[in-house]
Amino acid sequence: MEIKPIEKVNVGDKVFEQLRDLLIEGKWKQGDKLPSENEMAKLFHVSRITVREALHKLSVLGLIETRLGEGSFVRKIEVSENMNALIPFLYLDNISNLQVFEFREIIDTEAAGLAAERADENELCQLEAIINDMKSSSERKDYKEFAKLDLDFHLKISQFSKNPLLYQTNNILRQVLKISMKDVINKMGCKPALRYHRLILDAMEKRDRDEAKRLMREHIHNNSTYYYRS
C-alpha cells in the first residue's frame, strides 16, 4: 500500500482524497483497522489535526467508524446506501438546464427501458396514481405541485429499473433536477408532460422496452428543443 506525502496546498483535502480513494478501491477491507492518527500523520507528512479532520469527513460519509479507545475501522460500502460517499464533493454550481437535459436523456431513457421489463403491477399502479395527481394539479394550475409530481414520476421509473446506481444517481442530483423541472414546467406548461407520461406508462404496461426508451428520449429531447427555442 503506497501513501504519498502531501507536498502542495489544500493539505486537508489531499489527505481526505487519498484515504477516500484507498477505501473505495478496497486497499483496506471491511473491518480493517486504519493506522493511528500519529502513524498517518508521519506517512502523509502532515499534522495529527489534519488527519483527524480527514477521518471525520470519512466517518460522516459512512466509510469508516471510530470506536472510542480502539481507533478507526472500515465500514462496509453499500452502493445502494452509500452512493454519496462515492462522489462526496460533487460540485453542482452553474449547472445549466441544457446539461440537465443531456443527463436525463441518457439516464431516464435507459431507466424507462429497464423499468418496462422489471416493474411489477403495484409499481405500475404507483405511476398511474402519479399521472392522476398530475392531472389534478394541472387543473388547479398548481405548477409547483405539478413539477414535484413530474420529478416523482421520473424518479420512480429509475427506482423501478431495479438498478440502484440509476436511482441513487438521480437521488443525489434531486435538488438540481427539482430546480430544472420547475423551470421547464413554468415555461412549457403541463400538457407535454401529461401526454408523454401517459404514452411511456402505456409502453411499460405492454412490457415494450424499446418503445418506452424511444418515448422517454423523445419526451426529454422535445422538452429541451422547446425550452431553448422559446
Image (spheres, rainbow, N blue to C red):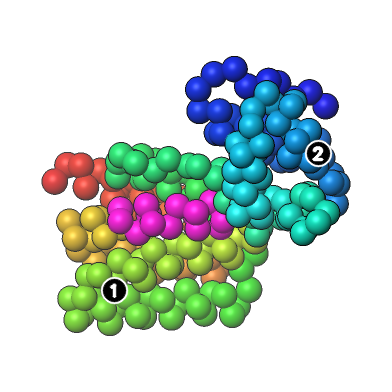
Residue 154 in the image: state x and y as whole percent.
44, 62
Q: Is residue 207 above or below residue 85?
A: below
Image side of residue 185 versus residue 30, left or right: left
Q: Is residue 192 above or below residue 56?
A: below
**Image quarter of residue 53:** top right
Image side of residue 175 versus residue 89, left or right: left
Which residue is found at the position 83% from the left and 54% from the top? 70
> Which residue is more in the foreground, 27 or 174?
27
- Which mark is drawn over residue 35? 2
SS class, disc 1: helix
How far, Cα to Cα, is label 1 from label 2?
51 Å
Residue 22 in the image: state x and y as whole percent.
73, 35
Which residue is found at the position 17% from the left and 76% from the top? 141
SS class, disc 2: loop
- Magenta includes 167? yes
> Which residue is more in the foreground, 228 or 34?
34
Principal secondary structure, stretch drawn in magenta: helix
Residue 136 in the image: state x and y as whole percent.
28, 82
Crowding around mark 1 (Cα neighbors within 10 Å: few <14, some 14 to 19, many 20+) is some
Image side of residue 139 versus residue 63, left or right: left
Which residue is found at the position 69% from the left and 26% from the top? 44
Between discs 1 and 2, the one toward the N terminus: 2
Specify the farthest residue to the left. 230
Q: Can I make out residue 98 in this image?
A: no
Image side of residue 181 versus residue 210, left or right: left
Report the magenta residues as a range: 166-180
**Image quarter of residue 162:** bottom right
- Amino acid type, residue under disc 1 in the picture: Glu
Q: Is residue 71 above or below residue 26?
A: below
Q: Which residue is mark 1?
A: 145
- Magenta includes 229? no
